[in-house]
Image (cartoon, rainbow, N blue to C red):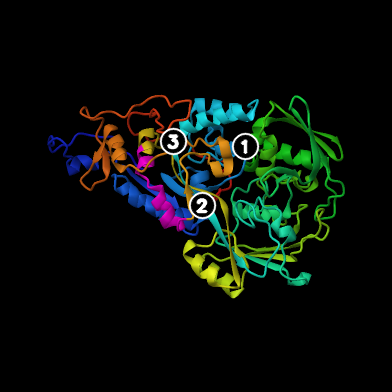
Amino acid sequence: MMLVIAVMSIIGPAAPGLILVAEAQARPRLSFEMLSLPWFPLSDKAAEVVAEQLKKVGIEIRVVKLESSVMYPRIMNTFDYDSFALAVSQSPDPTGMLNAMHSRNAIPGGSNYWGYANPEVDRLIDMVLTAKSEDEARELAWKVQAMVANGPFIPLYLSINTQVIRAEWKNYTLMPGGIIEAYNRWSLLYMYKSDKLEENVFRIAFPSDILSLNPFMATDLRSLWIIAQIYDPLVALSPDLKPVPWLAERWEVSQDGLNYTFYLRKGVKFHDGSELTADDVVFTYKFGIANKAPRYLGAIAVLIKDIEKIDDYTVRFILKDPSPFFLVSLATSFQFIVPKKIWENQNVTWANPNPIGTGPFKFVSRTPGESIVLERNPDYFKGAPKIFRIIMRVIPEAETRYYSIKRGDVDTERYATSFSLIPDAEKDPNLRVVKTPDIWLIYIAFNYRRYNDTRIFEAINYALDRDEIIKRAAGGYGVPVYTILNKEWHGGYANTNITFKYDPEKAIKILEDAGWLPGPDGIRIYVGKQQTATPTPQTTPPTTPTTTPTTTPTTPTPTITTPPPQTTPAPPAAPG
């Protein structure tokens, strides 16, 4: 958003409450360009509804639809944007979302895409990570949520997954996020449609191609879904979202909580036939952390002091401080163990064109922009999958994906089927509609590096009718969310006292008290704080839960800054 220093009109003084056109043209306008993904309707349609709602209070949103390969670098690498609408994946680990508000992650490849920075928030987040108990962590998490409630990250709703799959498939596992979400390592191991192995070809439609096969650098869940079939983590999530052993068969925790000793499964083979050992585990984590790879910028990098090999099948993680979140962070961070002998002489940004892991499926081929083929690993340590082959096909259009499922050309799609197509799917005996809590938190965000008057964000929160957004963007399949944590995924860590009741009149008052008055076209321009206005209380955010969050704006007038040039761009990130 280009902001121009305000000047006095050369035409002469205006009547009270009237802003002349010449003066208005020289003043900052509340006008934002909002980037949006056309192939992800849950956030794309939400952006359109948000634009309509904010226009009613004098804020202009210009939705610009871009393909992910163009949009993500602007958001994640060069920070060349005003605002955007997107989705972020949820997990049972609350530190993932909390860390997205920490200034250390406001870097290329980091999760703080919006560039939020507050030293006190940073301090509290670090305290959450090393809290002595879950009760202490919850209290601190509530304080963080109260402080960032009027920040540049504005959550809208948590979607409900509506997965359409061919009826002949059976034996899949239901988990929050759906039957084939990236956290769900169970479905593709055991699901099948035929007693004849070669007939169990699972065809899945993606709306867009993956962006990376590099397990260190991938940040979009399309890429991570493919990578998760080829590689394995040390610890995974059970169907009820608890950390369970995976490549590690068990672990022990020292009495002081500082040492986690993992005992690896013996005989686990990489796809090239070599055996997985402690050397591969130690290398993977040290390599990822030392190179500040995107998959290693979260809680794990903050918590780990050292990693050491005890013997060929035993690894010890030494923590800086005890943390109640270490295991769940291991299970949800998409940190996959790679073969040391292949990666030790590579750069962390290596394209990894022929990935070799220990996972249930082996990489066969990729046609960029079109398809990826994987085949079952007959020597998988948990038993060979019942699926013989996975074929991922890129089909950009939502209706085309659905009718491809209906015809039997593909078996399902990567994301939820458009809600407008669900009634038809429910009538088709050849299809099943599986509904589960979804992994996606839909949100809008503003570039805090450019624009950091938190009164504007507070007004936006009150100007948004989240129920209408859910109805129009998701067909009613969603739950309103008002803060960075939500009770569906984070339970008691979510500060459910924070709400923003739809109140456009209150939003208008906040804007006008802050000096934003309607211009000739109805879009607000900055004229300075009005003497006759009653200012919105500007107090330090409460450290206990509040029903009406308030924050002190970091600047009294609009500001714009230019982000520093990024000399080492990191891979773009995707929804989640």
Asked if the residue under mark 3 is in contact with the one under mark 1, i.e. CB atoms within 8 Å, the reply is no
On the picture, is 422 further left or further right than 251? left
- Front residue of 488 and 70: 488
The amino acid pointed to by label 2 is Ser
On the picture, is 465 further left or further right than 390? left
Helix, strand or loop at disc 1?
A: loop
Crowd band around label 2 with a 10 angstrom C-alpha radius: few (<14), some (14–19), many (20+): many
On the picture, is 56 further left or further right than 195? left
User: Where is 252 relative to 349, above or below?
Assistant: above
Residue tagged by mark 2?
159
- Front residue of 521 and 203: 203
The amino acid pointed to by label 1 is Gly
Q: Which mark is residue 298?
A: 1
Q: Earlier in the sequence, mark 2 or mark 1?
A: 2
Can the viewer see residue 143 in this picture? yes
Where does the magenta region start and end? Answer: 459-476
User: Where is 19 relative to 476, above or below?
Assistant: above
Location of the N terminus by quadrant is top left
Given this view, does label 2 or label 1 mark the residue nearer the observer?
A: 2
Helix, strand or loop at disc 3?
A: loop
Q: Which mark is residue 151?
A: 3
Tell me how far mark 3 sits from mark 2, CA to CA: 22 Å
Tell me how far mark 1 sits from mark 3, CA to CA: 20 Å
Quadrant of the rendered image containing residue 454: top left
